[in-house]
Amino acid sequence: MIQEVIVTTQNNSGLAHLAPMGIHSNGDEFIILPFRPSTTLNNLLESKTAVLNYCDDVRVFAGCLTGRRDWPLRAAEKIKGQVLQCALAHTELELLRIEDDPTRPRLFCKAVHTVNHAPFKGFNRAQYSVLEAAILISRLDWLPLAKIETEIDYLRIGFEKTAGDREVEAWGWLMTVIEKFKAEAKV
Ligand SMILES: Cc1cc2nc3c(=O)[nH]c(=O)nc-3n(C[C@H](O)[C@H](O)[C@H](O)COP(=O)(O)O)c2cc1C
């Protein structure tokens, strides 16, 4: 299964980095697949650790894609690393091995510690819409604009029916990026 999480990593100086990533999970084993170039990849190779943050505040996902990476963090419990304060739960990872690749290396990790912080309150369609729109924005440079617009129109249906304040804010950040991209491309 692939889980959409916020990966926190840090370099040897302790500088933290947040990135949304789709993580392959199988029990206590996880594979992180960063596209090169990637700060997450560099940090993981330096520190050999990472934290998976299970987070229902989609502003963090949209924020990381729109220049808003400054979310409150605190120290991890068993590894050198940082935990997202708004995470519902988190898993601390150690790097086991890497299968290198010029495009997308595979980083095999094992869970060493998992903590629950708050209850999961159920699925929300607007959160799905924001995640999908954030992925589209991460691919703005290589997906056809017509495809992006068609998909956004579909995602807007569930978004408008179910969004709360956090989803509205996140969606707004993403739509601003698309509008700016279109204006610059003079579409
Ligand atoms: C829901 C979601 C899942 C993503 N999954 C991945 C992924 O598996 N690998 C990846 O390289 N980027 C993924 N991205 C895009 C990255 O978050 C973004 O490009 C980020 O800047 C990665 O580069 P970094 O490690 O330098 O921060 C995803 C984005 C979103 C919104």
Image: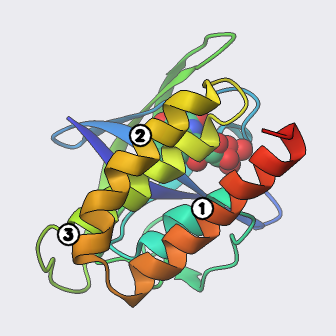
**What's the amino acid at mark 3?**
Asn
**What's the amino acid at mark 1?**
Leu
Q: Which residue sits at x=23%, y=75%?
A: 162
Density class for disc 3 (Cα within 10 Å; few <14, some 14-19, many ≥20) is: some
Quadrant hosting residue 182: top right
Secondary structure category for the residue under label 1: helix
Q: Picture coordinates of residue 48 (x, y %)?
A: 59, 44
Horizontal side, residue 120 vs residue 24: left or right = left
Horizontal side, residue 150 vs residue 139: left or right = left
**Against 117, is 182 above or below?**
above
Q: Which residue sits at x=52%, y=41%?
A: 149
Q: Picture coordinates of residue 141 (x, y %)?
A: 73, 30
Density class for disc 1 (Cα within 10 Å; few <14, some 14-19, many ≥20) is: many
Would you name the residue on which mark 3 appears? 124
Query: First in sequence: mark 1 or mark 2?
Result: 2
Q: Picture coordinates of residue 20 (x, y %)?
A: 51, 53
Q: Nearer the viewer, mark 3 or mark 2?
A: 2
Would you name the residue on which mark 1 appears? 174
Q: Which residue sits at x=78%, y=47%?
A: 181
Q: Quarter containing ligand 1?
A: top right
- Give how far apart the Cα atoms at labels 3 and 2 are: 18 Å
**What's the amino acid at mark 2?**
Glu
Badges 1 and 2: C-beta atoms under 8 Å apart?
no
Query: First in sequence: mark 1 or mark 3?
Result: 3
Total marks shown come to 3
Secondary structure category for the residue under label 2: helix
Quadrant hosting residue 127: bottom left
Would you name the residue on which mark 2 appears? 151
